[in-house]
Image (cartoon, rainbow, N blue to C red):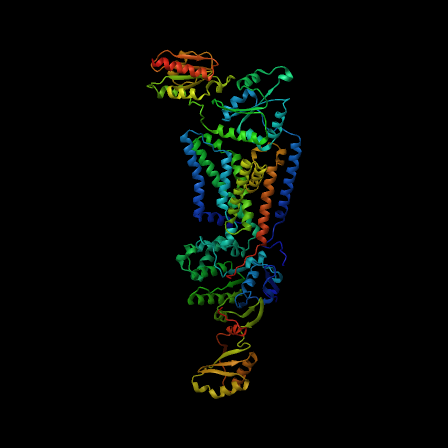
Amino acid sequence: MVPIKLNSTRATPLLMRILPALGIGYLAACFAAQSYLSAQKIDLVEWVDLKKAAEISKKLDKPIMYDFSAQWCGPCQALKQEVFGDKTLAKQINQMFVPVQVIDRVREDGANLLEVDNLQKKYKIDSFPTLVVMKVGQSDIRTQTGFKDKETTKEFIRGTLAWSMKGANPYDVDWKNLDDVIVSSHKSERPLLILFWDERKEYSRYEYLANKDLVKVIKENFVPVEVTVPIKANDFKLAESKDLVDKLAVKRSPALVIVPPDGGVPHFQIGNSTYDDNKDFLQKYLRFSRK
Amino acid sequence: MNKSIALMTIKQLWNRPVRLVLLAGFVGFPLLIDVMNRQMGFKDHTSSAMVIINTSMFVLIIGAGIIGQDISDGILPLIFSRPIKRWQYILTKWLAVAFMASIVAFLNLFIHLLFAHGFTFELVKGIMPFDLAQIVLLAMGTTSVMLLLSSLLPGAADVGVILLVCAACFVITILQHFFHVPGMEDTAMNVFAILFPSFDLGDIHSLRQLLSIEIGRYFAVVLVCLSGSVLLVNEKEFSYGSN
Amino acid sequence: MPPAIEANKLTKEFRSGKVRALDELDLSIDKGEVFGIIGPNGAGKTTFMSCLLGLLYPTSGTISIDGMPPDAMEVHRKIGYLPERLDFIKWMTGKEQMNFHADLLGVPPKMAAVEIERLLKLVELDQGAWFRKIKSYSRGMLQRIGMAQALLGAPAFLFLDEPSSGLDPIGVRLFRNILRDLKESGVTIVINSHQLDQLEKVCDRVAFIKGGKVQTIENMNAITMREGTIVLRWMVDKESDVSKEVLGKVVAAVGAEVQNFEFPQALIKISGDEMSTKLIHELGLAGLPVAQASPSAGRLESFFDQEGVDPNE
């Protein structure tokens, strides 16, 4: 066979002979580096400060994933190594959630920080590890208690992602803006139901609202409006909205206020009530108003 | 690279109506889904994942038979009788197809963002530089794999093989989910990573992260595929007889 | 002077040696020569042509063009090729195809434009077809554009595989004239063809290939061949100036045979070059000097007869 010379149309440049070998060598180096790094058992999740989580979650429109754990808890360490130390899963968690680690320090320090305690109560945490995924403004949450294996947690993460990407869920009411409602429903026969909600507070929205019957009563009988507390100067554009809120003078939250359509006396439910209490409150008003 | 071959490759796409229709379909159909999502109150999700999947589809459509079709059409012997080095032909085809797929993928992303945000600053923010670089990376990666397959297989059989392998990966993933056969999903993910090589530029925060397996695999796959194609085509014989 | 094209013990095997398409083929072609290749199907003609173009690689032996291997860049700058299978880029127009090849050859654009127009006119491709897609071309039109692209860049070597196939008689004559002009400008031409009569009119030499080997090479410029008939012609006014008896005696004396005599030409069967030379000399001495002597049509066909092969297979 005639040997191929450099000026041949069929010559392969030297670079093209060397580069694949270099590529394979580079890959081998990466594998070596990876096995060295995984031996160090690094937690690859970029945990966010508890206090900033809600704000970041709202800004990035991502659900919060709370990891309730403790240093002494064996399964918590397994979860850390197998899930939080897994490059793909950690990347997914970092990209799709606002991850917050809530570490119980009762055994070590005697008591927890107030925020930790509040969160544990809010989500009724009674064992570790527990993963809780919630979305700001929605009452539904997803929970995984304990750590079975990597696959189960992977499924949980995948499931919550699908759930969190949906714009609506069965427990959610379409809470409207007060300005929009006043403009559009002047002649509505339905009473307004105004929810005063403070996101900073550790009270669980799930506890307050996540009930199918309650949601049904609201959707069928009221015009639901949400007012975020604390109220800022430019929250309302319409004077009518400002007047109404001033008149109601709600000082504590959460609060539910029923404003009857005929200008009648408003009804108030103030404080940390549960969804059952709230349902009773609404149904009482409806019975009363029909008489 | 060779300007004539590059222009010929680009014009080739314009003269393949079936492929143009497929491209229009793959750009238009997700847009339709976005419109429907909007109507139903769901948010528009032009995620990075969607950009990535779409870029691969565009490469498959544009690059099908990148070499194999030229061989089957019988146009290569005459082209190779001219003073052009075969490796230049290969690399030019690679770059031309990757370039075209990147343009279509970018337009696809742009159209989706336009729809989601209108002509606002949001649109510009949405077109992250990383997304564009990601598109180019994925386009060059997938095209290199198709180049190697196409150097071995006639016509557009390269796409057939890729789709077959994807179907096999789907089947083995089901094996894990329903029949709890362990490790199948990881195998499928690894095969996908070889067929559609890419890495996340956003992961590179420091020099240490350059030693990630994704990056190493990307360069290994792309360089091996490119060199493999050149070697294969250099050794290829073309019989020009009628019998 | 070294040959322009040289094949030395050129062997090409397929299917791991099961098929030996070229079997230690030896051939040399001089610069400026028009060289024909004939042979039955499967003889190795196309394989040889493909080796010349660097599309097939020899199993053993060597082949060189201008002293360089066929896949050298320098060689590819000098060759033009008209393939038998006219697989051009179908969606291109005729002009686009020409521009594409001119680009590949590195012909500057302005020069290319002039050259392309000249070549398309030369091959008499209808001007309306220049801007039509090649997929709409007839076989004859494909042949013409094929010749035009082969002539781009003024090649020093031209390889033609069945150049007249699909052409009407006018096209055949046009191509013959083109080849004659090219020969005069010193282009080395190799023609692979089944159209023996065309080869006879154009070629300097013709090789008969069979079984992957050159069986014989015929010099077309010689007025005779090993065995066959020659046509003798006299330039005289009256038929009586050419005595049939004298002719018959002289022909018999040299051992040849008069096959036919129709004034002013006679068809004489001879056994070889030596006999035809002697005959012409003796006719001159006998007062019948020959004005023209040429091989009769069909001399190439006799190769096939001798080899027991039907040239029309």
The residue shown at (47%, 33%) is B46
Residue B52, compared with residue C267, is above or below; it is above
Q: Is residue C28 left or right of residue C262?
A: right
The residue shown at (43%, 41%) is B25
Q: B66 and C246: which one is in front?
A: B66
Q: Is residue C243 visible?
A: no
Q: Quadrant of the N terminus of chain A?
A: bottom right
Image coordinates for residue A250, horizontal then vertical, percent: 44, 12
Q: B216 and A159: which one is in front?
A: A159
Q: Is residue B231 visible?
A: yes
Labels in figure, total = 0
Q: Quadrant of the C terminus of chain A?
A: top left
Q: Is residue A47 left or right of residue A278?
A: right
Image coordinates for residue C299, horizontal then vertical, percent: 51, 74
Residue closest to the far left:
A187
The quadrant holding residue A76 is top right
Image coordinates for residue C92, horizontal then vertical, percent: 45, 53
Q: C55 and A6: which one is in front?
A: C55
Image coordinates for residue A140, horizontal then vertical, percent: 48, 23
